[in-house]
Structure formats: structure tokens, C-alpha cells
Amino acid sequence: TGLNLGYNTEASPIEVDQNFDVLFKEIGWNKDRLAIANQIHQSTIKYATKGGVYDDTDGLVTDRVEISLGIRVADCAAILAGDSINGVVGAFHAGWKGAADNVVPNGIDKMIQLGADPDHIRVYLSPCISLHNFEVGEEVSSKFPDQFVDRESYNKPHVDLKGFIGWQLLNSGIKIQNVEISTHCTVQDSKYYSYRRERGRAGRMLGMIKLNEEI
């Protein structure tokens, strides 16, 4: 159940197309103006100038009011950032690989290059896998600072992905009061798609952001 927006899932392309139609009709946005990343779990950020699929990237930024940015997730974090004063938005996909490879700081830097001011950037971090459910091996946990790895409470290391991304945002100059981190865990709460819980049966959720027309 749900609104599966992932073409790389068990759902047929026709079903996913219909789900996109339902979503965009509900929110009143133009589907053809959606710029969406074809994610590869790395840290490349691209500047979006029009709607469509942007290959080989895990982040998009734009200063164009006519388009929206989209990131698909199913345990990874969707980070949506916007400076409404200077008219710049960004959307970034952060699983453990992208997060460890600095996809979020790279995205914030790209926004600043477009004219965003860190003092005015507001950030939302979507529901994603929580520390309690993010069990990993040492080869993964070693990619993160020790303060974001719990090696004491469980048989194997657990990574605090949300905490690590929040720390990166603060180090990128974002004010703590301008960061909102969802407390929801995609693995624990069945209303979200979760690849770790559902494996190949998991659908994909979509985080989106755009500038308002009056900017």
C-alpha cells in the first residue's frame, strides 16, 4: 500500500506513472517541471535548469522558480534545503555512502555558489533509518566519526545517520534553529517504505521542494 514513486521497484511503470499523476494533481504542481535525480549513492551535485531525469547524481540545486526538485528514498534520508530570501533550493539523497562522502556539505556549498546565504538556509531531514535499526559492519561504521557510532549497546555497530547529517549541516554554517530532523524511523514505522524491512518489495517515497512563484 502507499504511493510508490520508484521505477526501480516491483511496481509496473504504468502504476508508477499513475501514482505521479495522483500526487501532482493533489498538490497542484506541474509534473513536467520536476527535476529528479537518478541516484547512485555518491556525492555529485548538479544544477537543474529544467524538468527531467538527471543521471549520475545524488543532489540537485536550482534558482529557477519554474521547476521542482525530487529525491527518492526508502531508508536513506532526503534532505530538502531552501533559502527563500535569495531564491535557492536544494534536494540531496543521503544513504550511508553519500553521507560519508559529504553529499550534504557538497550540496550546501553548491547552494551558496548560487547565491544562498547559510544564515537563511532552512533544512528538513526526512524520515529515514534510525540508529536503533541501522546495524552495520565495521567496514561501514569506520567511515563515520566515533560519536555517531554505537558500539556498546548492540552486538554489531549501529550508525546514527540523522545525527551525523545534522552535525554536517551545522559545520556547513546552517543555524541549528533552521534545521528540522524528523524523528520517524522508516524501518520501525510501517507507513513508510523501507528497503531494510521489505527488501525487493519496497516502494520508494519522494521528497520534493520548489521555490514559490512570488520569489
Image (spheres, grey):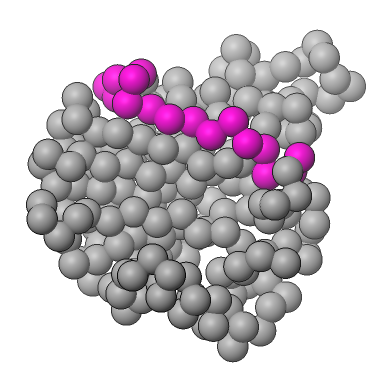
**Depth check, front residue: 1 or 78:** 1
In the image, taking residue 176 as reference, residue 16 lies left or right, namely: right
Outermost residue on the right side: it is 155
Q: Quadrant of residue 179?
A: top left
27 in relation to 177, above or below: below
Across and down, in percent, residue 206 comes to 50, 59
Instruction: Give the magenta-colored segment's residue range.
Output: 173-188
Across and down, in percent, residue 112 comes to 18, 37
Of helix, strand and loop, which mostly describes the magenta segment? Answer: loop
Residue 126 appears in the figure:
yes
**Depth check, front residue: 102 or 190:** 190
- Residue at 62% in and 68% down: 4
- Residue at 60% in and 12% down: 147
Q: Answer whether residue 186 is magenta in the image.
A: yes
In the image, taking residue 141 as reference, residue 181 lies left or right, namely: left
Across and down, in percent, residue 203 comes to 67, 64
**Depth check, front residue: 54 or 17:** 17
- Residue at 10% in and 52% down: 215
Q: Answer whether residue 214 is magenta in the image.
A: no
Viewport quadrant of the N terminus: bottom right
29 in relation to 40, above or below: below
Outermost residue on the front side: it is 26
Q: Quadrant of residue 180?
A: top left
Across and down, in percent, residue 96 comes to 59, 39
In the image, taking residue 103 as reference, residue 158 lies left or right, namely: right
- Residue at 73% in and 62% down: 202
Residue 52 appears in the figure:
no
45 in relation to 96, above or below: below
